[in-house]
Amino acid sequence: MNCAVSTTSSSLSRRRLVLGILVLLLVDVIWVASSELTSYIFQEFNKPFFSTFAKTSMFVLYLLGFLIWQPWRHQCAKRLRETRTNRLADACAADGAVNHTLSDPLYVPVKFHDLQNEKILTTNDDKSIKKPRVRFSNLMEVRQLPLSQALEAKLSRMLHPPVRDSEAAVRTSGKFTICQVAKISFFFCFVWFLANYSYQEALSDTRVAIVNIISSTSGLFTLILASIFPSNSGDRFTLSKLLAVILSIGGVVLVSLSGSGSSRDKEAIGSLWSLLGAALYAVYIVMIKRKVDREEKLDIPMFFGFVGLFNLLLLWPGFFLLHYTKFEAFEFPNKLVWIYLVINGLVGTVLSEFLWLWGCFLTSSLVGTLALSLTIPLSIIADICMQK
């Protein structure tokens, strides 16, 4: 029996790993295409903060799931019932004793069943014995709640909707509630935005291939952070992981040194932005893997939906800051650029970030970041084909 369970578990792990690798490969293709489109947009509308804010805010579309996805609606209804019940309890506690809120007592006669209908017990000796019963008072005391509390009390006593199989599975798997998902999104909103803003700034100063080459160094940051803050046994430091990271970084160094001196000087700022983005991406994925050990516990679309909401509500003052410091003057793009931004945001950000986080959960944080290295040959091929 133990061998069968072990074999099944090993087979499931392999399938998860294969699925995760396929998802990450798809993400690489989407990211390279999105980077090329972003680089093209910056030729006409070089506004990295505007681009990052617009595309990140599109995550709020995931919150439409509360209208169409039944398990999310059930969680909302349950949360509203709990809030209503707590509000009623707080109101009663504030009034002091409950009796002060009730009406004067009204005594109503109580009708009991006829004694002739009372059951008779028969013993082994064929002796009949009346079934013992408790006799209550003939009067019943009735009190009424005030109208302001009667409706709340009735709603709190209403039957809960039938528990679905999906809801039972959520409770047994320890899935995060809506409030917990919102708190996680609030914490990671700023780190995620800064990582993407750094990447957009790098694309505005440097070629796509160079940006993706420098961004692949996030594997080194991830290896270090995952060893310090491991989320599972797969994040432990090993020599094979170190060798993989060294080979990856070595390839980055060789390709970077192959450029001319003038080119390196011109693209130094973009390289620094790429390096900052790589470090922030590593912080983001390692910390979220530490907070959420299994993908079943977190509704990834809900997570990104709240990220988009917090981005929309909290980060708009950045427009004023960058405008008045003359770092990025605020202006609206034309119609064609708007179309490109929307397409790039929906596919290159909303869809790809969901797939990337899912792929990281299916594999590991280190595999997820090392998969970024595959964008290097793809982006070089794209630069050769599109920019000659």
Image (cartoon, rainbow, N blue to C red):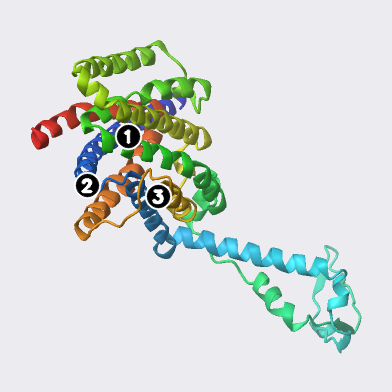
Residue 20 disc label: 1
Q: Of helix, strand and loop, which one carries label 2?
A: helix
Q: Is residue 328 visible?
A: yes
Looking at the rendered image, the quarter that the C terminus falls into is top left
- The residue located at (59%, 65%) in the rendering is 80
Indicate whether 369 appears above or below 341: above
Tell me which numbered mark, 1 or 2, is placed earlier along the sequence: 1
Which residue is identified by label 2? 41
- Asked if labels 1 and 3 touch by Cβ distance under 8 angstroms, the answer is no
Question: How far apart, in angstroms, are the residues tagged by discs 3 and 1?
Answer: 41 Å
Residue 160 percent location from the top left of the image: 59, 66
Up the image or down, 88 lies above or below 374; here it is: below
Is any atom of residue 163 visible in this view?
Answer: no
The three-letter amino acid code for the residue at tag 3 is His
Separation of marks 3 and 2 at Cα, in angstroms = 20 Å
The picture places residue 45, in percent across and down from the top left corner, at: 25, 49
Identify which amino acid the numbered label 2 is placed on: Ile
Residue 71: horizontal and vertical position, in percent?
Answer: 46, 58
